[in-house]
Structures are given as C-alpha cells and as structure tokens.
Image (cartoon, rainbow, N blue to C red):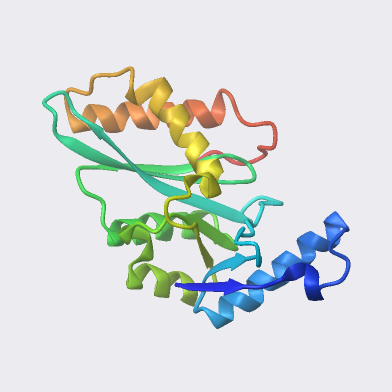
Amino acid sequence: MGSINISLLAWLPGLDDVDNKSIVFEKLFTMARQLTGGILTLCLNNGSCIRLRPEYKDHVWSYDLMMARTAEGKAFRILTLIDEYTRECLTILTQRRITSQDVIEQLFYLFIFRGTPEYIRSDNGPEFTAKAVRKWLNDLEVTTLFIEPGSPWENGYIESFNGKLRDELLNREIFTTLTEAKILIEQWRKEYNQVRPHSTQDFGIF
C-alpha cells in the first residue's frame, strides 16, 4: 500500500475555497492512484490524513466485516457494503467464513447490476487488501482507499451503519441457525433501505 505525505497548503493555491479544495483533493487522489498502484493514503505534514468525502451516488462505497454467533456459540461473519453518499446498503453477505474471493464475487454482482464506484473505502483486513482484490479493482479503475490501521473513525459511514445493525438486530436476536440469521439480516437490510431511507437517498432498491 502507498502513503503519500504532502504539504497541501505550501504549494496549492485556492485551498481556502471549499469548492476548490474539493476539486484539488479529487485530482490529488487521481494522481496518487497511479503512483501507488491504486492504493493510497494522502497525509498532510502534520500527520493528519485527507478523507475523501462522497459527493454523489456511486462516488464512494465502503465495506467492512462484522462477526456474530448463532445460538450454539458458533461464529459467523457479515460483509456489509454501503454507498456513502446515499447511505444505501447495497448488500450484506452472511456466511461462516468470508474470503477475498467472496468479496470479489459480491462486488462483481453489484458492478454488473449497478455499475462501478469511483472509490471504495475499507480497513486493512486481509479480505480487502488481498492482491487479487486490489488488482481486480485496479483493472476496473476503482480506486481503493484504505484507512489508517487502528483508525475506524476514518471509515465513519460504514462504522455508523454497522452500529445500527448490531444495536437493532444482532444484539437483540438469538439466531438458532445460520439460515435464520441470513433471513433476518436481509429483512433488516430491506427495511433499512425502504422503510427509513436516509434523506440523501434517491435510488432503486436492490
């Protein structure tokens, strides 16, 4: 993964203008993507990192992994993926084990039926940083944005979504089987998208 440290204020004009700042940051991410093989973190000289903010539908997606357990104590994993601008939950995959190939398959389905995002944000979990995932996304010109290790607040949109999922469902239900967990989690996802959409949402529901 690449990390580019730059002093923006030292050499880029017009950064006091919010609109100009957004345009400049977008160009910086585009340039840095080519220098780092599509994997980048842009940082200021004071150590703080620039977090690209979503500005329209399919601009930035983010995904993450969660863990829960069925009644007998056996763990299962949950892959969540959202559009950061609309807050729509695009998919939730629930399985005992989730690999980098599972990540690619979920993205493949979404890319066919919805199209590709410009950026996709995640933590540094091996399912997301695997060479096969990075190369596949890079070939499709989707820029991967990896947050700094130990900094979940840099992935705030998906963290907020995961918190709702855990508080409203995972912590309240006892899943007797994995199949039951899959059904209830998918029902919750549809309710989240259809019954109480975020104010910025304007999309067709999957």
Identify the residue at image location x=66%, y=73%.
Answer: 6
On the rendered structure, is 95 left or right of 165? left
On the rendered structure, is 100 left or right of 44? left
- Is the residue 189 above or below the residue 2 in the image? above
- Is the residue 53 above or below the residue 175 in the image? below
In front here: 47 or 95?
Answer: 47
Residue 106, percent across and down? 38, 54
Residue 75, percent across and down? 19, 37
- Is the residue 155 above or below the residue 179 in the image? below
Which quadrant holds the N terminus? Answer: bottom left
Residue 186 visible in the picture: yes
- Is the residue 81 above or below the residue 132 in the image? above
In front here: 154 or 77?
Answer: 154
Residue extending farthest to the front is 46
Identify the residue at image location x=14%, y=34%.
Answer: 74
Residue extending farthest to the bottom is 35
Residue extending farthest to the left is 72
The tally of labels here is 0
Residue 140 visible in the picture: no
Identify the residue at image location x=42%, y=21%.
Answer: 168
Residue 191, percent across and down? 49, 25
Residue 167, percent across and down? 41, 23
In front here: 150 or 173?
Answer: 150
